[in-house]
Image (spheres, rainbow, N blue to C red):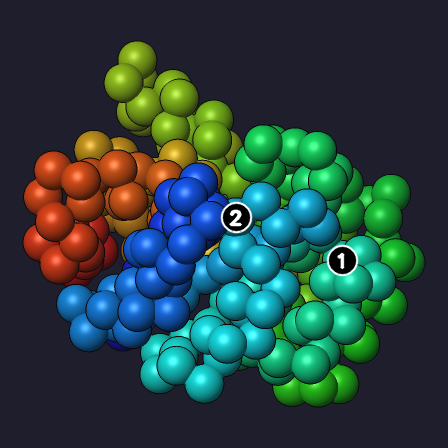
Amino acid sequence: MSCRLSVNINKIATLRNARGHNLPNVLQVAKDCQRFGAEGITVHPRPDERHIRYQDVIDLKPLITTEFNIEGYPSKEFVDLVLKVVPNQVTLVPDPPEAITSNAGWDTIKNRNFLKDIVKTFQQKGIRVSIFVNAEEKMVNGAADTLCTRVELYTESYASNYRQDKNEAIKNFVLAAKEAQKVGLELNAGHDLNLENLKFFYQSIPWLKEVSIGHALICDALYFGLENTIQMYLRCLK
Ligand code: PXP
């Protein structure tokens, strides 16, 4: 099985919210992404609902025929929503409510007990839990202690250093990915992945299970169209 492409459709909701009507239609776009080959749909609801709204998440559930991944900070409202919707996967992200986007992984050592409780709550409902971490072996190890079964590596630093020296940029990620393998954690990755840097990332870590990609993919779709763009990303993962 090759690496799964999960399309993050938050930007579609941002565009819709700019006008207050239902264009583009987030539900239709999710269906179309799957029709065009996406192997998962990711959403990241935030408390201010500035992009994906809680109601969108509920409405999306019956339309997802691939894999539904809900990511976010595990506030009470978020936990209740996820338990109601029961997606295939929840990705725990430590982003404060005012953050524009996720900007760091969890400190899995400091937050071990908190995360452990949340992981258990979701796993009891049969939801796979992935924890968003920086590419540091000790944070991967800390995640394993929470008894989650996956981690998502935060790839911002890889993406921003890629052009300067891709071999240097990937180093910590390969080490963290090997650590994950050693402690029996499956691996996801995301943030600022794009058509330029994705292939090398996957070639360097071929046991990667899933990438979730939003911003660059939706931007590329303005030029290439959504169907072509999804196919182009899929080709980076084969
Ligand atoms: N993974 C996580 C945990 C995220 O928070 C985000 C951004 O919402 C992504 C992946 C996707 O990042 P990008 O939009 O840069 O592709």
Instruction: Bin the neighbour count of mark 2 within 10 Å (Cα to Cα): few under 14, some 14-19, many 20 and up.
Output: many
Q: Where is residue 194 in the image (x, y as percent from the top left)?
A: 28, 38
113 lies above or below 221: below
**Image position, residue 131 (x, y; %):** 64, 56
Q: Position of residue 116 (x, y in %)?
A: 83, 64
Q: Which of 199 and 99 is in front in this view?
A: 99
Nearer to the camera, 12 or 186 = 12
Q: Mark 2 points at which residue?
A: 51
Whether residue 168 is visible here, answered yes or no, is no
3D distance between C-alphas at marks 1 and 2: 17 Å
- Residue 218 versus residue 83 in the image, above or below: above
Q: Which residue is drawn at 11% across and 38% down?
A: 223
- Name the N-terminal-most of marks 1 and 2: 2
The N terminus, quarter of image: bottom left
Residue 235 falls in which quadrant of the image? bottom left
Residue found at the far top of this picture: 164
Looking at the picture, which amino acid does disc 2 mark? His
- Tell me which residue sits at (13%, 59%) in the image: 227
**Disc number placed over residue 86 in the picture, else none:** none
Q: In x, y percent, where is residue 215? A: 36, 40
Residue placed under numbered mark 1 in the picture = 74
Question: On the rendered structure, is 66 left or right of 91?
Answer: left
Q: Which of marks 1 and 2 is in front?
A: 2
Dot 1: element: loop
Residue at 75%, 85% in the rendered image? 124
Residue type for callout 1: Pro
Q: Decide: marks 1, 2 in contact (CB < 8 A)?
A: no
